[in-house]
Image (spheres, rainbow, N blue to C red):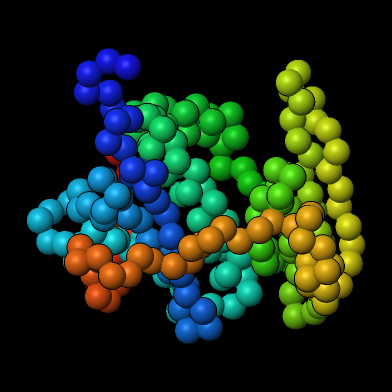
Amino acid sequence: MPENDPFDDLDPCDGFHIVKTGGLATVTIYCQVYTGGKLFNLRDSNPDNAVVAIKSWNNPTEADQGACTRLYLVLDAVARYLTTGGTWDELVDGFRDMHRFTGNANCTYPGYHLLDSYVTTEGSYQHIFVKDGEMDAVLWEEPIHSDSGSLIGGFISLTDLETIRQEQADDDTIWGVKQEGDGELEEGDSSVPSSLPGSQDHGDEKSPS
């Protein structure tokens, strides 16, 4: 290996991370950066700003929980993109080009709200939609893309929330598995703020252009 190889002193924790925390009272998405295996503040010299709140939902409904998960998945992918060497210029260009194609179009499902979305242990994405005010639910597994770009597999199952939860409890080989440490912020390091900086919410800041 060459001298000063960038991976010589790299810690597995290093890079950008998105963390989702919360419960019945509030759910919040945070951004944090690690370097040398420790939290690092990119913004200023205040160690209490090393964890920044991006968006919070107070007294979250099921629909709020779904919205939180949906945003978390996107931001988590962006964090991984930056950690693996991507740049904001390239990312913004990609979003801009995608927007030229899609315009402001998006998919809507009147009468339903997203409850959860996750990656299964087999690498596919599954989404749970629940009918507003009822227990009727839809389990949607996206197809995967083949090397040629065609779509393989996928299904949409009309069911109910109780059945989905029971199947999740009974079969841990199909459903997404919560990663160890998911939804928890590191404790015990002097650089970790004792209380999360909700006042440091920068959710309204503009993205680099």
In this rendered view, identify the residue nearer to me: 66 or 190: 190
In the figure, residue 112 lies in which quadrant? bottom right
**Looking at the image, residue 14 lies above or below residue 4:** below
The residue positioned 38% from the left and 66% from the top of the image is: 185
Farthest residue to the left: give it: 45
Give the image location of residue 44, x and y in percent. 12, 54
Farthest residue to the right: give it: 158
Q: Quadrant of the N terminus?
A: top left
Q: Is residue 140 left or right of residue 51?
A: right
Farthest residue to the top: give it: 2
Q: Is residue 91 left or right of residue 172?
A: left
In this rendered view, identify the residue nearer to me: 62 or 195: 195
Give the image location of residue 135, x and y in percent. 81, 77
In the figure, residue 187 lies in which quadrant? bottom left
Give the image location of residue 172, x and y in percent. 77, 61
Farthest residue to the front: give it: 1
The residue positioned 48% from the left and 63% from the top of the image is: 181
Question: How many numbered discs sit on the rendered protein?
Answer: 0
The residue positioned 67% from the left and 67% from the top of the image is: 115
Give the image location of residue 88, x and y in percent. 34, 33
Would residue 4 be seen by someone viewing this image from the given angle? yes
In this rendered view, identify the residue nearer to me: 34 or 91: 34
The residue positioned 25% from the left and 65% from the top of the image is: 189
Q: Quadrant of the C terminus?
A: top left
